[in-house]
């Protein structure tokens, strides 16, 4: 019913107003859905690229709890997040809704001993 638009039509006829979430609002919600949020290819148990795997391993080894989103599952989010963050590649790591960076930055923070403290300020 929902996919064909019938649900929207029925609700509209009954006076129920349905607002479609904008992509920007959706991205803001997603990047803030967990204090530490990783947008990656695949998921933490089965990363689908070496860079995503490296970031997952770094976070796990530091004992950081994080949420994740598989950007391969949603092309709109994948393309939108590149513009939203002004960061062209994945993975992308966010802390409290703010971009920390990609693989190189995460690994550099870890090497410097600052990853865990950066993600717990």
Image: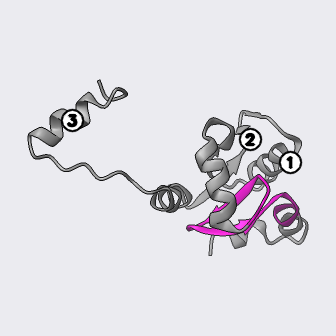
Give whichever of 81, 47 is nearer the camera.
81
**Above or below, 119 relative to 43:** below
Residue interval drawn in magenta:
87-107
Q: Secondary structure at mark 3?
A: helix
Which residue has dot 1 on it? 51
Find the distance from the CA under tag 2 to the CA under tag 1.
Answer: 9 Å
**Label whose residue precedes the other's in the sequence (1 or 3):** 3
- Residue 28 percent across, percent down from the top left: 50, 62
Numbered circle sitting on residue 12 = none
Q: Residues within 10 Å of mark 2 (few under 14, many from 20)?
A: many
Which residue is found at the position 72% from the left and 33% from the top?
45
Q: Secondary structure at mark 2?
A: loop
The magenta stretch spans residue 80: no
Q: Residues within 10 Å of mark 1 (few under 14, many from 20)?
A: some
Instruction: Give yes or no for contact between labels 2 and 1 (Cβ–Cβ under 8 Å).
Output: yes
Q: Quadrant of the N terminus?
A: top left
Task: Give the left or right position of residue 86, taking residue 8 as reference.
Answer: right
> Which of the 4 image quadrants contains residue 89?
bottom right
Which residue has dot 3 on it? 9
Which residue has dot 2 on it? 41
Which residue is found at the position 35% from the left and 51% from the top?
20
Find the distance from the CA under tag 3 to the CA under tag 2.
Answer: 36 Å
Which residue is found at the position 82% from the left and 43% from the top?
53
């Amino acid at each position: 019913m929902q996919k064909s638009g019938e649900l929207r039509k029925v609700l509209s006829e009954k006076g129920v107003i349905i607002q479609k979430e904008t992509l920007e609002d959706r991205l803001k919600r997603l990047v803030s859905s967990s204090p530490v949020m990783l947008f990656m290819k695949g998921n933490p148990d089965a990363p689908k690229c070496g860079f995503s795997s490296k970031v997952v391993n770094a976070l796990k080894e530091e004992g950081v709890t994080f949420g994740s989103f598989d950007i391969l599952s949603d092309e709109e989010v994948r393309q939108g997040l590149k513009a939203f963050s002004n960061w062209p590649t994945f993975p992308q790591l966010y802390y409290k809704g703010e971009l920390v960076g990609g693989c190189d930055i995460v690994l550099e923070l870890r090497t410097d001993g600052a990853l865990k403290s950066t993600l717990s300020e």
